[in-house]
Image (tube, rainbow, N blue to C red):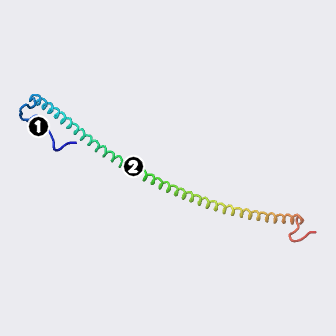
Amino acid sequence: MEDEAFHLTPVDVRRYDFGSALRGYDKQRVDAFREQLADELERLTRANSELEAKAKGFHEQLRAFRERDKALNDALITAQQLRAETKEQAEREAELTVREAKAEAERLLDAARAEVRRLQEELDALERQRRSYLAQARAMVEHLEAELKAAEQSPIGAPKGTDAA
């Protein structure tokens, strides 16, 4: 933590005058110590500046990372929403396809049933025609049989309608 009340610079250390006193400190040693202290303050000030610059760079990187993280999260959310919407759309399309297929199948079944009914009616009509033909043929055969019997019973050359017995 920085103490705002006491802030020394290397220049302050170099220029500070301790004043003279009788039997005071060794001036050369004090000057040498002040020089060392000023050099150390300069070094610490430079190091502090470098650290502050690095910290600023790290803060910038952190901000950029946070922005990228937010962008990635936004992209992920958008992708999830898109996936959900695509899935819903695919389900709706699948349901529609199934409904259309069922409707087409029902239409084809109805057409096939109608064709079966038509063919059954045609078959029934053909069966009626066959029975009618057979009945006519039987009637004709019976008529021809009756004529054959009649022809067998009448003498040859006898006029029709008279018996030659």
Q: Quadrant of the C terminus?
A: bottom right
Residue 35: give its label. Answer: none
Residue 24 screen position, x and y as percent: 8, 32
Question: Within 10 angstroms of label 1, few (less than 14), some, or many (20 or more) residues?
Answer: few
Looking at this rendering, what residue extends furthest in the bottom direction? 161
Residue 160 falls in image quadrant? bottom right
Question: Pointer 2: what residue?
Answer: 79
Residue 119 screen position, x and y as percent: 65, 60
Q: Quadrant of the N terminus?
A: top left
| Three-letter code, disc 1 | Asp
Residue 50 screen position, x and y as percent: 21, 36
Looking at this rendering, what residue extends furthest in the front direction? 23
Q: Nearer the viewer, residue 135 or 89?
A: 89
Question: Pointer 1: what residue?
Answer: 12
Q: Nearer the viewer, residue 29 or 91?
A: 29
Q: Residue at x 50, y 56 (%)?
A: 95
Pick whichever of labels 2 and 1 is earlier in the sequence.
1
Q: Residue at x 77, y 65 (%)?
A: 135
Q: How far, Cα to Cα, is label 2 from label 1?
A: 61 Å
Q: Vertically, is 137 above or below 12? A: below
How many numbered discs? 2
Residue 128 falls in image quadrant? bottom right
Q: Residue at x 36, y 48 (%)?
A: 73
Q: Vertically, is 114 above or below 79? A: below
Q: Nearer the viewer, residue 46 or 156?
A: 46
Looking at this rendering, what residue extends furthest in the right direction? 165
| Three-letter code, disc 2 | Ala
Residue 156 falls in image quadrant? bottom right
